Amino acid sequence: MSTRINASSDRRIWMLNGLEVTRLCIDFTFTIHLWEGSRELTIIIEVPFTLRIDEHEQQLDPNAGTTLGPALQILHKPVESLTAYRHGRLVVAFVDGTTLDVDKDWQYESWHTFGSGELADIAMLCSPHDAAPWGDE
């Protein structure tokens, strides 16, 4: 299954249909590994984020591992899209309507992503600097 990207001046949206969360890692970050066939993507979140499931919204913090229990529900969920905004926000949308939303932290690196194969263009870093996560063209 191929990956589509929609790019505009303020955001990049990757349609990731077919990828599924296959692994989660919790240390002082929250790492999400997505995989399907020859496509792989890793998302590393280093700051507090919001998880929305149905009508429930929860604030989770990778630096407080005990808060991350609700995020385990995304394991094996299929992903619909990943959206990175120029100002640093990241949104991971799942097929069932669940979303994971990370806002930019102006003091620390907030998140970064890297992929392989056809997802290699999803190599981004949300630093505390005033630059788009994908780098300025």
Image (cartoon, rainbow, N blue to C red):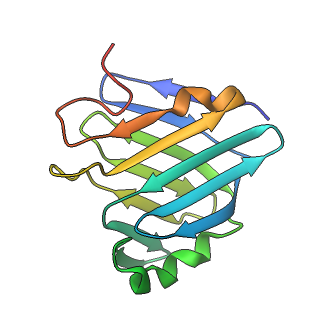
Give the side of residue 130 with respect to residue 40, left or right: left
Which residue is at the front of the view, 19 or 121?
121
Q: Residue furthest top?
A: 137
Residue at left offset 36%, top offset 59%: 46
Residue closest to the far right: 37
**Horizontal and vertical percent position of residue 96:** 62, 65
Query: For the N terminus, which image quadrant?
Result: top right
User: x, y (%) of residue 10?
Assistant: 30, 29
116 vs 29, left or right, is right
Name which residue lies at 36% across and 68% down. Answer: 50
Q: Position of residue 136 (x, y in %)?
A: 30, 19
What residue is drawn where x is 33% and y is 12%? 137
- Residue drawn at 56 percent across, 45 percent down: 81
Q: Quadrant of residue 118?
A: top right
- Residue placed most toward the observer, 80 or 76: 76
Asked whether residue 19 appears in the rendered view, the answer is no
Q: Is residue 116 above or below residue 9?
A: below
Residue 45 falls left or right of residue 3: left
Residue 115 appearing in the image: yes
Residue at the extreme front of the image, as rendered:
27
Relative depth, front residue between 17 and 70:
70
Quadrant of residue 88 in the image? Answer: top left
